Amino acid sequence: MDTCVIVWFRKDLRVHDHQPLIRAAKSSLPVLGVYSFDPDEYSDTAYGFTKTDLHRAQFIRESVTDLRDTLSDIGVPLLIRHEHPANTFASIRKEMNIESVFLHEEIGSEEQQVEQAVRSELPGTTFVVDHGHNLYHPDDLPFDIQDLPDTFSQFRKKIEKNGTMVRPSLHPPKHVQGADLPFNPGEPPSLSELGLEEPEREPRYRGGSSNARQRLMGYVFEKDRLRMYKETRNGMLKEDDSSKFSPWLANGCLSPKIVYEQILKYEAERVKNKSTYMLYFELLWRDYFHLVHRKHGNRIFFPSGLRDVEVPWNYNKAHAEAWREGKTGYPLVDAAMRELKETGFTSNRARQNVASFFTKNLGLDWREGAAWFESQLVDHDVASNYGNWLYIAGVGNDAVQFRAFNVEKQAKDYDPEGAYLRYWLPELKNVPAPWIFNPREMGMVEQEQYDVILGEDYPLPIVDLLAAMQERKSVFLDAMQNE
Ligand SMILES: Cc1cc2nc3c(=O)[nH]c(=O)nc-3n(C[C@H](O)[C@H](O)[C@H](O)COP(=O)(O)OP(=O)(O)OC[C@H]3O[C@@H](n4cnc5c(N)ncnc54)[C@H](O)[C@@H]3O)c2cc1C
């Protein structure tokens, strides 16, 4: 039997800045790459919808195909299977001796359980685990993980005061001795094999590190958008309002260190301003949520969150469904939720608003909202998703006691012409500002004039915005007092 070493790819679908691949290449044994589409990741959640819907599934399929091609360019075959990873490793072991497995660390408990199952299949094999998902290496932080500050702002100040350095990104090996496969390398499963339907529209973002690089260079240098990021980042409609790096960052097609290096290059060659700092600042938020997850473990999934506040969340199937389908009667919420369902993406501003509406107006259990985001988002990242939901729900890392977004005011402030709302809500396409922000206030005359009948073409509001918010505020503050 041949002996090999394995690079096990999970949420690190790239060859650049990949320490496990470099270690494997240096091992002087033939190298095999492995990726398993784990059926558990495509199963139904307790809420009745799938854990990974078609947008992310399609993105991952494309990313794995791209990974296979880029690995092949340096001589490494990629074994692709649709089964539990433990089964994949068990069948490899029947054909080959596996000396070592090189992999990046995943901090999620589900991922760690899967890793344990794989380790149990390979008792004599060495596992070498590296950190590879963040700007800052955990060993370089100026504090122990248990002392991670409770707010982002304190964390940022500590990092900046200490002058913590981002380690340089790593070049991929030029040529690697690949393993000879005694079996078929396999293909990514089709969407229907994953239990999903074909998408109705072309994917908004295409997976793979080649597309990641194209977006990075296009946004930063070719379109020269980085210089105005701070001014445009809250826009909801245009692709270049923000970087849109998240789908590739979340699936590991792009290393955040590469983004950081391009920011520095841009600052040296073109301009260093508040926008260039702001993009780094956002990447730091990402690091922060990953550290929060590392520190608190499964507590980030508790309904009481990090604050340990027992908030009595509501359960209302009809409200949850109206929210998911974009039929709440509040245009900003509806536009964002339809965009999310149709494309797997919506902007940060929109995410904040719909999450606030879900928890602070409807008063629903934030975990159901987070699970829907997990299902739909092409850029789903456990720590960023659950960390942001905790924050918005008021049980995470926000020092403010009760913070709620007024979704009508936010629409006026961030979409003053109503262009975003009209784009995603065709039934309101003839409704001008200011009616577009609160269609419920239109009388019969306006409804006929603008060709929309409330309650028929567009829903009436499912709750009274301000009354519901006041009610939730008192429920929340009572819960805080009993903390
Ligand atoms: C309720 C909620 C859920 C979210 N879920 C996710 C998620 O599952 N995955 C995810 O990557 N982001 C999540 N975010 C954060 C943020 O909305 C997205 O990262 C951002 O919209 C992606 O667009 P962009 O790449 O154009 O961001 P940009 O504004 O261009 O920011 C650059 C990068 O910084 C990081 N970043 C920016 N804002 C945040 C933030 N608040 N938290 C963590 N990282 C951030 C992302 O990696 C992003 O790609 C969530 C935010 C909210 C409010």
Image: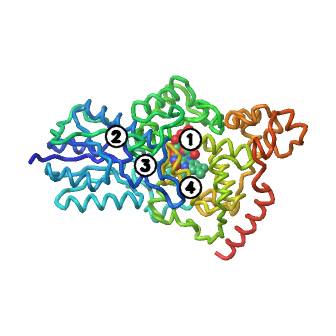
Q: Earlier in the sequence, mark 1 or mark 3?
A: 3
- Residue 203 lies, in percent from the top left, at 50, 34
The type of residue carrying mark 1 is Phe
**Residue 188: which disc?**
2
The answer for how far apart the CA atoms under marks 3 and 4 are is 26 Å
The type of residue carrying mark 2 is Pro
Name above or below for residue 475 compared with residue 340: below
Q: Is 138 left or right of 463, judged from the image as shown? A: left
The answer for how far apart the CA atoms under marks 1 and 2 are is 23 Å
Mark 4 Cβ and ligand 1 under 8 Å apart: yes
Mark 3 Cβ and ligand 1 under 8 Å apart: no
Q: Quadrant of ligand 1?
A: top right
Q: Earlier in the sequence, mark 3 or mark 4?
A: 3
Contact between marks 1 and 2 (CB within 8 A): the answer is: no
Q: Which residue is mark 3?
A: 136
- Local SS, label 4: helix
Q: Which residue is mark 4?
A: 370
Contact between marks 3 and 2 (CB within 8 A): the answer is: no
Q: In this rendering, which labeled residue sits more in front, label 3 or label 2?
A: 2
Q: Which residue is mark 1?
A: 345
Tell me, yes or no, if residue 284 can be seen here.
no
Q: Quadrant of the C terminus?
A: bottom right
The answer for how far apart the CA atoms under marks 3 and 2 are is 32 Å
The type of residue carrying mark 3 is Tyr
The answer for how far apart the CA atoms under marks 1 and 3 are is 26 Å
- Local SS, label 3: loop
Q: In this rendering, which labeled residue sits more in front, label 3 or label 4?
A: 4
The answer for how far apart the CA atoms under marks 4 and 1 are is 14 Å
